[in-house]
Image: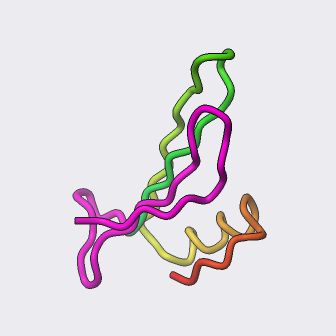
């Protein structure tokens, strides 16, 4: 199981942060995955997947890209 947190609501798709259960990691050694969607046309968004192996790099990315979120990792 994993937890999904909505980072930003878009018209077609929402940007989400996926975190594993406590004490676990994803396959490949990832501690978090972010699925971002960029406008493609009126009916579709293009999906961009970012994977993080360190929580410090995740924190830096969240502060830079989503400064209004209050997620502590």
Judging from the image, the colouring scheme is rainbow
For residue 70, side relative to residue 19 (left or right): right
Q: Residue at the front extreme?
A: 11
The relative height of residue 15 versus residue 41 in the rendered view (above or below) is below
The relative height of residue 43 versus residue 34 in the rendered view (above or below) is above
For residue 41, side relative to residue 35 (left or right): right
Residue 66 lies in quadrant: bottom right
Question: Which quadrant holds the N terminus?
Answer: bottom left
Q: Position of residue 10 (x, y in %)?
A: 67, 41
Residue 65 lies in quadrant: bottom right
Residue 28 lies in quadrant: bottom left
The relative height of residue 42 versus residue 68 in the rendered view (above or below) is above
Residues 26 and 35: in front is 35
Number of callouts: 0
> Residue sitting at 43 percent across and 57 percent down?
33
The relative height of residue 45 versus residue 56 in the rendered view (above or below) is above
Q: Position of residue 63 (x, y in %)?
A: 72, 70
> Residue sitting at 45 percent across and 54 percent down?
51
Look at the image and give the residue range highlighted in magenta.
1-30
> Residue sitting at 67 percent across and 15 percent down?
41
For residue 31, side relative to residue 6 (left or right): left
> Residue sitting at 66 percent across and 79 percent down?
70
Q: Is residue 12 magenta?
A: yes
Q: Position of residue 13 (x, y in %)?
A: 56, 37
Q: Is residue 11 magenta?
A: yes
């Amino acid at each position: 199981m994993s937890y999904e947190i909505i980072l930003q609501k878009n018209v077609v798709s929402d940007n989400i942060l996926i975190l594993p259960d406590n004490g676990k990691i994803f396959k490949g050694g990832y501690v978090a995955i972010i699925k971002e969607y960029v406008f493609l046309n009126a009916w579709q968004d293009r999906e961009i997947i970012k994977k993080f192996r360190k929580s410090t790099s995740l924190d830096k990315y969240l502060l830079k890209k989503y400064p209004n979120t209050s997620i502590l990792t």
